[in-house]
Image (spheres, helix red, strand yellow):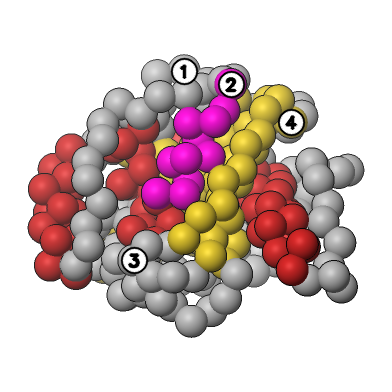
Amino acid sequence: MELRLRHDWPQTEDEALRLQQELRPLVRSVPLPAAPRTLAGLDVAYGGSHGSADDRVAAAVVVLDAETLEVLDSATAVGTAGFPYIPGLFAFRELPVLITALERLATTPDVLLCDGQGLAHPRRFGLACHLGVLAGLPTLGVAKTPLLGAWDEPGPDRGDSSDVRHDGEIVARVLRTQDGVKPVTVSTGHLIDLDGACAQVLQAAPRYRLPETTRLADRLCRDALLAEQAPSCPGHRAHGGIGP
């Protein structure tokens, strides 16, 4: 697939902040025009936890049939973070390698589900917003915990939810994907509204707390990183593809 928008990648914190401010007005929260036929999960694995620009990272994208959740396409990429860990600028460590993986897909997904935040971000421009603007596709964030804001505990049943508010604005929703399990945090990225984003997360999570998009992309990016490390780590065995 091809991106709709491109830009140079910042080298400094000030450059990254300016770019977020420049791109933020492009974000649109609107209902999906039609039920998606395909959903793509995106995730990144790290070869270390040092937070430096030299960290090795592996990205994976897995495209699923929205109804059956059958895997239709997948792609990976391995590279260097290229940007240090700075709170609020995490996307600049992950997006370059994620975009490389996206561009290796043979198909263009209808909706992108990122392992991270979208609007629930100090400058309302998390990874899901940034990626959505670049890809020109409906994009949402599914995180294990909220990044900021306040919320009430949702009810105990699958589908129960509670809005997350920050500075008087609804920025996300904590959503119970299975009865009695800890909720996930859903935030809009681009070209989707919060109701639609939650509906897609529930569609992709028929059995487990995390949606299948996240579970499969997480497995694939870890396998890609392990495969790269295998030649220099005899004790490691690489696994290819996505198993059952």
Mark seen at residue 162 = none
- Of marks 4 and 2, which one's residue comes earlier in the chain? 4
Residue 126, above or below 217: below
Question: Can you say whether 76 is above or below 70 in the image?
Answer: below
Residue at image mark 4: 71
Quarter of the image for residue 192 reads top left
Q: What residue type is labelled 3?
A: Phe
Q: Name the residue under label 3.
A: 83
Residue sitting at 54 percent across and 31 percent down? Answer: 104
Of mark 3 and mark 4, the one earlier in the sequence is: 4
How many residues crowd mark 1 within 10 Å: few (<14), some (14–19), many (20+)?
few
* Residue on which the image places disc 1: 34
Quick one: SS at disc 2? loop
136 drawn magenta: no
Q: Is residue 129 above or below residue 168?
A: above
Identified by mark 1, the residue type is: Ala
Please name the amino acid that badge 2 sits on: Ala
Boundaries of the magenta span: 96-106
Q: Distance between the residues labelled 2 and 3?
A: 28 Å
Q: Position of residue 17 (x, y in %)?
A: 16, 62
Q: Main secondary structure of the magenta part?
A: helix
SS at badge 3: loop
Sequence-first disc among 4 and 1: 1
Q: Mark 2 points at which residue?
A: 106
Residue 47, x across and y down, in percent: 60, 69
Q: What is the quadrant of residue 135 in the picture?
A: top left
Mark 3: few/some/many CA within 10 Å (<14, 14-19, 20+): many
211 vs 162, left or right, is right
Residue 36 in view, yes or no: no
* Residues at marks 3 and 1, CA–CA distance in whole angstroms: 37 Å
Which marked residue is nearer to the observer: mark 3 or mark 4?
3
Q: What element carries label 1?
A: loop
